Image (spheres, grey):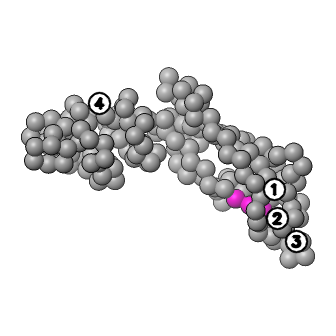
Amino acid sequence: MLRSIATLLLFIVFYFIFSGCSKENANVDCSSENLSFTLSIVDSDCGLASGAISVVPDPGADIVRYRLNEEPYTSSGNFSDLKPGLYLISVENEDGCSIAKEVLIRSGISFKESVRPIILKSCAISGCHDGVGNVDYRVFSNFNPADMKARTQSRNMPKEGTLTQEEIDAIACWVDDGALNN
């Protein structure tokens, strides 16, 4: 269900207007080249390779090759089976002019639906992060997401080690998505 929601609600379209490029052919002036494109992103699921990126050249764009990260250029702008993470999409024209854009594929983990219940059940309890002695984890702004990820993955927190691997993975995916208050 999260993937369906992510696919429908987080179908993100970036409109990228060409504002500069690199060039492999020193005899070509890339400043007047049209390399504008739209990116469509389908988020993945936590720990799975189910995300996708589609590059659609804008009308009049001279894009002929597409690349994901440092892989070789291909003739297709469709990339699938992607895990959550940061990707670099590059496009190139026949003259060797190119431009790149970073894209984040999120895991679809929601703080309110997935992470907050874990925290309330296992962390924001009496004697721990309930605001009496330690940091109050009932308040979102009190989180240190990177520390929370490190401590749960090493099983240092919660002290009783009561989190399941699925809960630890959900916290890690939420942090990797940017620790959003969503």
Q: Which tag, 3 or 4, sits closer to the chain's start?
A: 3
Name the residue tied to disc 4: 117
Q: Which tag, 1 or 3, sits closer to the chain's start?
A: 3
The span from disc 1 to disc 3 (Cα, nearest Å) is 13 Å
Helix, strand or loop under label 4: helix
Q: Amino acid at mark 2?
A: Cys
**127 horizontally vs 99: left or right:** left
Please state the extent of the stretch shown in magenta in the rendering: 96-100
**On screen, residue 63 above or below 138:** below
Q: Amino acid at mark 4?
A: Pro
Q: Amino acid at mark 3?
A: Asp
**Residue sitting at 31 percent across and 47 percent down?**
141
Name the residue tied to disc 2: 97
The label shown at residue 120 is none
**59 horizontally vs 178: left or right:** right
The span from disc 2 to disc 3 (Cα, nearest Å) is 9 Å
Name the residue tied to disc 1: 35
